[in-house]
Image (cartoon, rainbow, N blue to C red):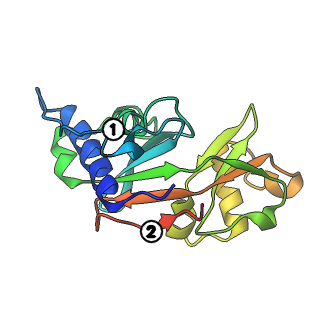
């Protein structure tokens, strides 16, 4: 999904206001005319919110798809990333000014059967196994300079299975693209060819 610069700014603004509202009683939310910005009301879009402090991960939670409006999915992912990422303690009020918010708006996922179809810098990965499920956003591979084998190994590790399971048997994989927007520079790379 192509997202206009104005809508990107609104998404980041609402994510920031949502994060602030966890600590500020009677927090103010910008009034948005959804008739003017229909991209925000799109349903069934996936979205992840990543929180970082000094480029270090502080929380990341999202949804591969959601029946809610995109903006509501972003709000919920922001709250969950700040309060319920099991890898971290909840965000504190003292951290608010240090946190950079990054929002990834996902395309629908499609199955692939050949690892050669994975495009680093474009695709995110989903391990689509009912017992071992994991997701890695497209930017994980580029930020870590992963090759396809390293990306697959990281996916297996995140799923809690043998890191080299992908070499031993074909994994049930899906790929997706993402439009990634960030408070750092306001606009980050778009990992989106669709």
Q: Residue at x 21, y 54 (%)?
A: 98
Q: Look at mark 2 in the image and give the residue it sits on.
A: 189
Crowding at label 2, few (<14), some or many (≥20) Cα neighbours within 10 Å?
Answer: few
Q: Quadrant of the C terminus?
A: bottom right
> Does 128 sit above or below residue 188?
above
The reply to whether residue 52 is visible in this rendering is no
Q: What's the residue at 29%, 43% (across, down)?
A: 15
Q: Nearer the viewer, mark 2 or mark 1?
A: 2
From this view, report whether residue 38 is shown above or below residue 155: above
Specify the farthest residue to the right: 169
Q: CA distance from mark 2 to mark 1?
A: 23 Å
Residue 149 appears left or right of 181: right
Labelled pair 2, 1 in contact (Cβ < 8 Å)? no
> Of helix, strand and loop, which one carries label 1?
helix
Query: For residue 31, which quarter of the picture?
Result: top left
The reply to whether residue 75 is in sight is: yes
Q: Which mark is residue 8?
A: none
Q: Position of residue 68 (x, y in %)?
A: 46, 30
Quadrant assignment, res 130: top right
Instruction: Residue 51 in the image: state x and y as whole percent.
Output: 35, 49
Q: How many marks?
A: 2
Vertical order, 87 against 1 (above or below):
above
Tag 2 secondary structure: loop
Q: Which residue is mark 1?
A: 82
Q: Residue furthest top?
A: 26
Q: Position of residue 33 (x, y in %)?
A: 25, 39
Residue at the front extreme, as displayed: 35
Return the disc, 2 or 1, that comes first in the chain's sequence. 1
Q: Residue at x 38, y 43 (%)?
A: 38
From the top left corner, tell me how far across and down residue 21 is, in percent: 19, 33
Residue found at x 46% / y 45% = 48
Residue neighbourhood size for the residue with mark 1, other residues' Cα within 10 Å, grouped as few (<14), some (14–19), many (≥20): many
């Amino acid at each position: 999904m192509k997202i206009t610069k104005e809508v990107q700014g609104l998404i980041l603004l609402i994510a920031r206001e949502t994060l602030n509202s966890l600590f500020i009683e009677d927090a103010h939310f910008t009034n948005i005319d959804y008739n003017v910005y229909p991209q925000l009301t799109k349903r069934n879009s996936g979205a992840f919110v990543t929180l970082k402090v000094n480029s270090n991960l502080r929380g990341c939670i999202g949804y591969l798809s959601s029946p809610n409006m995109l903006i509501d999915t972003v709000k919920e992912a922001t709250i969950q990333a700040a309060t319920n990422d099991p890898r971290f303690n909840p965000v504190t009020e003292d951290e608010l000014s240090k946190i950079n918010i990054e929002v990834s708006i996902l395309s629908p996922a499609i199955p692939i059967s050949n690892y050669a179809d994975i495009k680093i810098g474009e695709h995110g990965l989903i391990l689509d196994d009912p017992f071992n499920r994991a997701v890695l956003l497209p930017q994980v591979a580029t930020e870590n300079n992963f090759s396809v084998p390293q990306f697959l190994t990281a996916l297996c590790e995140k799923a809690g299975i043998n890191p080299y399971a992908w070499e031993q048997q074909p994994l049930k994989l899906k790929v997706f693209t993402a439009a990634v927007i960030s408070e750092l520079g306001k606009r980050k790379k778009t990992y989106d060819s669709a």
